[in-house]
Amino acid sequence: MKDDFINHVKPLLPSVDYCSFRFVSKYTNIISATRGVVEPIIISEDDGLMVTIIHQGGYGYAGTSNLSKEGIMDAVKSAQDWAEFSKNKLTFIPDFKQIKSQAGNYYTNADEHWAQVSTKDKADYLLNVNKALKSKPTISNWGASTRFNKIETLFLDTNESHVRQKISYLLPQIIVSAEHKKEIQTRTFGGHAHARQVGYDFIDSIDMIEKAGSLAEEAVELSKAPNCKNMMTDALIAPDQMILQIHESIGHPLELDRILGDERNYAGSSFVSPDMFGKYKYGSDILNVTFNPSMETELASYNYDDDGTNAEKKYLIKNGLLIRPIGSLFSSQRSDLDYVACSRASSWNRPPIDRMGNINLEPGNDSFDEMISSIEEGILLETNNSWSIDDHRNKFQFGCEKGTLIKNGKLCGVVKNPNYRGITKTFWQNLIKVGNKDTNRILGTSNCGKGEPNQTIFVGHSTPTCLFKNIDVFGGM
């Protein structure tokens, strides 16, 4: 996507009311070691173009992996044909006059690039992590991996927009299972939550070898621990579980296309309706949630979305009050609600739709020790391992890898198979303490699915530890 390529393709933009070209180049490299053996190394590359045309009341898309002049022109012709076919058949036609010209770029800041470290050194490191994982005879399964993704996009349109972005992220993973009396318990490195826009030096900063040793000990401890009991109690939820809670019971129900019914037949709808914004009390007064694409190293940070909308931090929920949805510029035109820059696509062969970016719960004032000391009886819940939520994103049930009982302000013993359930409409009302910046963690997931055909995309969540009252906690079988 160098300047000569840009100069080659800009003249191919057709003379229509509005057209955009979104070029995408993706590179993935996954290195894994399981049970002391390096697995086949995965490398994949993918390049292509999505053409979007709005013309005379019609709307058309076309994608192609043929980036020659002929291939691009064929895609333009196909998008024009679809725009012509859709005239007078659409339930909504975007107002292209609201699309502003944008010029800029965004690049992930990485001190040590992935390519600077040899594949052999990366694989050897993972083998050393494996050795640390297999530290006890009762360890029955173990493994570690690093996944690197680089996504480069070029956005051009008939408004003279010119946007280049290059996002690279790293996903380190560790898994270890221990067996005791034919029951297996597993600990992971935050589930799949440690994806960040960082360089390879992030591996050194988290010290996967040391972390592997502590996770192995926790897996053994859990395998011998008693089952979590059923109780209505205070629940202190750690960041690597909070991100799932935010994702499923705030992020997805606030997606505007879901609220407007677009996802109903596939991923479900939402209990939220358009008339609730500015009026509905989503949670207690200390609940503050933002759409924030500007946080450095967070997974879904960027300067522009995939429709070329300028990205900025905005509140979704402020002091518990529902303010705005996760809706793009085009979706906002259908609802007269404010928008955020959330129009995102998984690749060149998918049109952008309303997606979460960085959905963050803003830190509060309480330290971890202060929250623990305030609890007479409760439980600390860490690391998601299962989730279930209904089609309206209201009733939910989540399972965690590890529970630690709290009694009279002190941590007092580990339990296995802790789960909790609730109703979104009331759960966030029970938020009574929000951890300070010292408890906050920048996390993310690389596998949020939505859309038909499906689009798997990366999403960031930054969150502190949070304390909830009157939570229905129950044990496994």
Image (cartoon, rainbow, N blue to C red):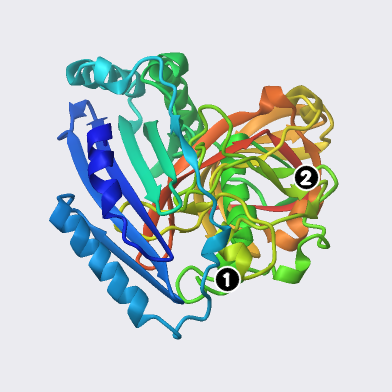
Residue 100 visible to an observer of this rendering: yes
Residue topped by disc 1: 269
Image mark for residue 346: none
Left/right of residue 108 with respect to residue 226 in the rendered view? left
Furthest residue to the bottom?
Answer: 88
Instruction: Using the image as rendered, state which of residue 468 and residue 360 is in the foreground.
Output: 360
- Residue in view at x 57 percent, y 71 percent: 269
* Secondary structure of the residue carrying numbered label 2: loop
Query: Picture coordinates of residue 331 (x, y %)?
Result: 57, 64
Earlier sequence position, callout 2 versus callout 1: 1
Crowd tier of the residue under label 2, counting other residues whose Cα lies within 10 Å: few below 14, some 14–19, many 20 or above: many
* Secondary structure of the residue carrying numbered label 1: loop
Query: Picture coordinates of residue 155 (x, y %)?
Result: 38, 46
Instruction: Using the image as rendered, state which of residue 132 and residue 226 is in the foreground.
Output: 132
Crowd tier of the residue under label 1, counting other residues whose Cα lies within 10 Å: few below 14, some 14–19, many 20 or above: many
Image mark for residue 287: 2
Instruction: Using the image as rendered, state which of residue 57 and residue 324 is in the foreground.
Output: 57
Left/right of residue 337 with respect to residue 209 in the rendered view? right
- Asked if 115 appears above or below 349 in the picture, the reply is above
- Residue in view at x 37 percent, y 62 percent: 52
Left/right of residue 470 with respect to residue 54 in the rendered view? right
Residue 328 visible to an observer of this rendering: no
Q: How many marks?
A: 2
- Asked if 278 appears above or below 93 in the picture, the reply is above
Query: Picture coordinates of residue 243 (x, y %)?
Result: 58, 43
- Asked if 280 appears above or below 182 in the picture, the reply is below
- Residue 53, picture quadrant: bottom left
Q: Amino acid at mark 1?
A: Ser
Q: Amino acid at mark 2?
A: Leu
- Residue 441, picture quadrant: top right
Q: Quadrant of the N terminus?
A: top left
